[in-house]
Structures are given as C-alpha cells and as structure tokens.
Image (spheres, rainbow, N blue to C red):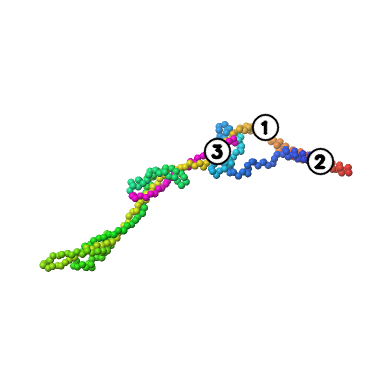
C-alpha cells in the first residue's frame, strides 16, 4: 500500500514539473502608483545600437514614471544603460502693452511729450520684464477736472442834475455783464449852476452810485495724459527638468523568409501541444496503475484471511 502511494505522489510531481504554467507572473512594479511619463522626443543613431528618449518634466511630475524596462523595436532589443538628469531653463516671452497715466498742468503737446520718455522698463504682475517703447499715436490729453472761484465785482453809475438828495431817483439795482448788482453806496456832489435870464436856478446835485455783486467763474484744474507703451517682455524660469534615457540596442536574430508557393506547405507543429497532454496521460496511467495494484493487494489480503 505504501509503495502504491509513493508511485502516485511521484506521478503527480512529474506532471506538475512538466506542465506549462497557466498564468503569467505579475510584472514587478505593476502596483506602482507613479504616473507614466511620455517622451518629448526620441533619437537613434544610424546603426541602431543606441536610442535616446528625452523627457521634459515639470515640478509636479514624478521621474519614477519614466519606463525603464527592455523593449524591441525595428529589429533591435534595447536595454536601459543610463538615465541622465539636466536642469532646463524655460524661456517665456510675449507681446505686452502697458498704459500709463500721469497729471499735467498744460495741454500743449510740447509740455506733454516732455513728461513721456521714449522707452520705459516694465515688470508685469506675473514676473515678465522688458523694455517698452512709447506709441505716439496713443497719446491723449483730457481735462482732469474743473474748479470754481467767486469774486466781488462793482460798477459805478452817475446821476446828475438832481433837484435834491433824494434816493428815490436812484435805481436800487443794475445789470452789468449779465450779472445783477445791487446799490451799495451813494456819493452826492453839489452842482453850482449859473443864473439863466437873470434868475437863479439854485443848487443841483449829482449822485455817484456804487453797485456791487459777486461773479462766479470756472477754471480747469489740470489735465490727465495717457499713453501706451508696447514691446516684448520675457523671463527665464528653472521649472523644467530634462531626463535622457539611454538604451543600448542589440540586433535580434534574423527572421527566416516566408516559404514561396513552390515550397512545401508548412506543417503544423503539434509537439508543444502533444507533450503536455502526453505527460498528463502518463500521470493518469500511473495513478490508475497504483490504484489497481492497491486494490489487488487488498483483495489478496481478504482472500488470505
């Protein structure tokens, strides 16, 4: 009985060793979480023995995502031999227009241009800098605002040949340059008149009346000058890292040419399939024989008893 069991174990072990694996092993690093990186360019020398893959990665990219495994391409088997790291300056530039605004006391162009240099250095909010030039076609002058002032004005009126110093004959207000002035003071003067036909006419009076009022006028407080400066702004930022993966290429075995019509038809090779099945069948025969011998031995022992 022990002998039959040993044969069964040997047959199973032999079948296990010879049968091909049903599942492929999980590649190393298959569970890695690094994001796969893709090359920005690929170069290869003329004989194909060296191939370079260039990766330009940003600060957020993980270089662990650069593929390092072997691969085959164009009749060569490539193996990674070196991975180089290089800091890359990134040059960013663009056209920029900056509008400036400044005050001016005068509006004539000579005074305005004296306030505006032909070139100015500018730095944008996002850190780009450059020299911009004045665009004369964009120079504009506008009134910054108005103010008002009030002053006192006066006017004098003379009323001669009055019989007495009675103010009822003097107007209480007058119009002067579109403004209404009111009576402020009266200065009386006496006229010594000569006799007419021997009769004395008596004293006559002249009233010198002064009228006053206020006048309000507006004036320009100043001017605002605006103009555009245009040009190119740029910056260099070290926010890129270049990785160069260098692969060494080995030629693959040449592939045999396909058979022509005159050649014998290709025969299907059953050997890779038949061998595993034969091994399994052999194992089955061994197990069956072991079981048969065990059964026979048990029968013989029963007969002896």
Is-magenta flag for residue 19? Answer: no
Whether residue 250 is visible to the viewer of this picture, yes or no, is yes
Q: Of residues 160 and 107, which is closer to you in this image?
A: 160
Secondary structure of residue under mark 1: loop
Q: CA distance from mark 2 to mark 3?
A: 66 Å
Labelled disc at residue 2 = 2
From the image, state whether disc 2 or disc 3 is nearer to you.
Answer: 3
Residue 99 placement (x, y as % from top left): 41, 48
Which of the image's four quarters has the N terminus? top right
Q: Is residue 266 left or right of residue 83?
A: right
Residue 176 vertical placement versus 5 (above, below): below
Residue 240 placement (x, y as % from top left): 52, 41
Q: Is residue 20 left or right of residue 113?
A: right
Q: Is residue 198 left or right of residue 100?
A: left
Labelled disc at residue 85 = 3
Q: Of residues 55 and 220, which is closer to you in this image?
A: 220
Q: Earlier in the sequence, mark 1 or mark 3?
A: 3
Q: Is residue 108 left or right of residue 89?
A: left
Q: Dot 3, how many residues are within 10 Å of its Cα: few (below 14), some (14-19), or many (20+)?
A: few
Instruction: Tell me where residue 35 sits by quadrant.
Output: top right
Q: Which residues are magenta?
A: 80-107
Q: Earlier in the sequence, mark 2 or mark 3?
A: 2
Secondary structure of residue under mark 3: strand
What residue sits right under mark 1 in the picture? 264
Instruction: Tell me where residue 206 sits by quadrant.
Output: bottom left
Residue 177 placement (x, y as % from top left): 27, 59
Q: Earlier in the sequence, mark 1 or mark 2?
A: 2
Instruction: Tell me where residue 174 sits by quadrant.
Output: bottom left
């Amino acid at each position: 009985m022990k002998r039959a069991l040993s044969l069964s174990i040997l047959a199973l072990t032999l079948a296990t060793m010879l049968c091909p694996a049903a599942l492929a092993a999980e590649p190393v690093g298959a569970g890695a979480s690094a994001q796969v990186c893709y090359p920005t360019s690929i170069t290869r020398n003329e004989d194909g023995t060296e191939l370079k893959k260039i990766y330009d990665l940003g600060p957020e990219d993980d270089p662990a995502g650069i593929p390092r495994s072997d691969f085959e391409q164009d009749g060569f088997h490539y193996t990674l031999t070196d991975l180089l790291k290089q800091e890359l300056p990134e040059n960013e530039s663009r056209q920029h227009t900056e509008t400036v605004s400044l005050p001016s006391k005068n509006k004539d162009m000579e005074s305005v241009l004296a306030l505006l240099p032909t070139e100015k250095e500018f730095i944008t909010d996002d850190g780009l800098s450059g020299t911009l030039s004045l665009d004369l076609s964009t120079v504009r002058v506008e009134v910054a605002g108005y103010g008002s002032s009030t002053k006192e004005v006066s006017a004098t009126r003379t009323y001669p040949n009055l019989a007495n110093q009675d103010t009822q004959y003097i107007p209480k207000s007058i119009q002067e340059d579109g403004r209404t002035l009111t009576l402020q003071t009266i200065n009386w003067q006496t006229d010594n008149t000569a006799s007419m036909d021997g009769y004395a006419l008596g004293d006559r009076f002249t009233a010198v009346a002064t009228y006053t009022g206020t006048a309000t006028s507006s004036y320009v407080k100043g001017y605002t000058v605006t103009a555009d400066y245009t040009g190119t702004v740029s910056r260099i930022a070290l926010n890129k890292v270049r990785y160069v993966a260098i692969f060494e290429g080995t030629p693959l075995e040449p592939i045999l040419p396909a058979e022509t019509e005159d050649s014998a038809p290709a025969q299907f090779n059953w050997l890779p399939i038949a061998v595993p099945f034969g091994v399994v069948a052999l194992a089955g025969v061994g197990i069956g024989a072991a079981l048969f011998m065990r059964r026979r031995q048990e029968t013989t022992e029963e007969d002896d008893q």
